[in-house]
Image (tube, rainbow, N blue to C red):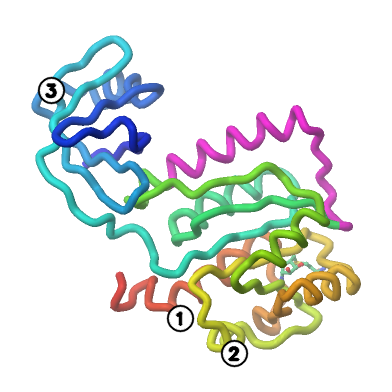
Amino acid sequence: MQRYFVLPEQISDDELVIRGEDVHHLKNVLRAKPGQNLIVCAGQGLDYQAEVMEIAAKEVRCRIIGRSVSRGEPRTKVIIAQSLPKGDKLEWIIQKGTELGAVSFIPFISKRSVVKIDARKADRKRERWQKIAKEAAEQAHRGQIPTVSRPLAWEELLEQTEKAEASFIAYEKGGIPLKAAISSVSANNIMVIIGPEGGFEEREIAAAKEKGAIPVSLGARILRTETAPLVALSCIMFARDDLGGENG
Ligand code: SAH
C-alpha cells in the first residue's frame, strides 16, 4: 500500500491532509479516487491507515481509519558520517542506508576528499539527497525520513563526534574489530565515520580519537568508500537485533 510522509501539523484527531508534490503523485501516478486506502506517517512513530475523502487541486483530504506503531524504525539509531565520495556514490549510500535503517546522514569534507562543493551547489545537492532519503523511506516502509545534513567541514565533524553518544571511525590500517567495538558500547545512538576513496590521514584518526571516536576495523579486506558504511550499519543493526532479529 502506498506510503506518504506528512508533517505532524497535517494530522488532526480523525483527519489528515496531504499537500505538496505528493498530491501530484496521488492524482497522476496513483490515480487515487475517494475510498482509496493509504499509509501515512508523520515521523513520530505512528503509521496512520487513511482513506481518501476529497481530492482538491493542492491537497488531498483523508479520514484516519486506524493507527499502528511504525515497525520500520530500528531501536538503535545509527548516524552515517560520510566523507564526500566521488560521483553519485553518496546517493547510493543514502538510498541503501535508508533501507537498512540509518536515521541520518552527515556528509563531510576530510583531507583526501576529492569532491569540493561550494555553498550554493551544496544546497541543491542536499535537496536532492533529502529527496532520495524520502523516496527510499517510503519504499522501505520506514516510520520516518532520515535527515541529510549539509556537508560539514572537518572541524564541524569533530564537534559532532564529541557530542555523539558513541562513535566509530572506520580505519583499515588499525582499530579494534567492529564486533568488539559494538559489544563495548551500550549507547543507543552510534555515529559511524567513513573516509573517502583515499582514506583518512593518521592525524585525522588521532583527532577523532581525541573527541571520543573508536577506530574500528571492518575486516581484512579493503572496502570501497560506498561499501564500508553499509557494512558497518548492517553489522550494528544485526548485533542489536534490528535486522532479522527479535526487533524485526
Ligand atoms: N585508502 C584505502 C581505501 C579507503 S576505503 C586504500 O588503501 O585503498 C574508504 C574508507 O572505507 C576508509 O577510509 C575507511 O573509513 C573505510 N574502510 C574500508 N575498508 C575498511 C576496513 N577493512 N576496515 C575499516 N575501515 C575500512
Query: Tag on residue 180?
Result: 2
Residue 88 in the image: state x and y as whole percent: 66, 44
Q: Relative to 120, say whether 149 is above or below.
A: below
Q: CA distance from mark 2 to mark 1?
A: 11 Å
Task: Identify residue type, mark 3.
Answer: Met
| Callout 3: SS | strand
Horizontal side, residue 213 vs residue 164: left or right: right
- The residue indicated by pointer 3 is 53
Instruction: Decide: few, some or many residues near mark 2? Use Cα within 10 Å; few <14, some 14-19, many ≥20.
Output: few
| Callout 2: SS | helix
Q: CA distance from mark 3 to mark 1?
A: 44 Å
- The residue indicated by pointer 1 is 239
Q: Residue 112 colored magenta? A: yes
Task: Identify residue type, mark 1.
Answer: Ala
Quarter holding the N terminus is: top left
Task: Identify residue type, mark 2.
Answer: Ala
The residue depicted at 26 percent of the width and 38 percent of the height is 2
Disc 3, disc 1: CB below 8 Å? no
Q: Please identify the dominant SS of the magenta region.
A: helix
Q: Earlier in the sequence, mark 3 or mark 2?
A: 3
Disc 2, disc 1: CB below 8 Å? no
| Callout 1: SS | helix
Residue 73 in the image: state x and y as whole percent: 36, 59
Residue 199 in the image: state x and y as whole percent: 81, 66
Q: Which residues are magenta?
A: 111-136
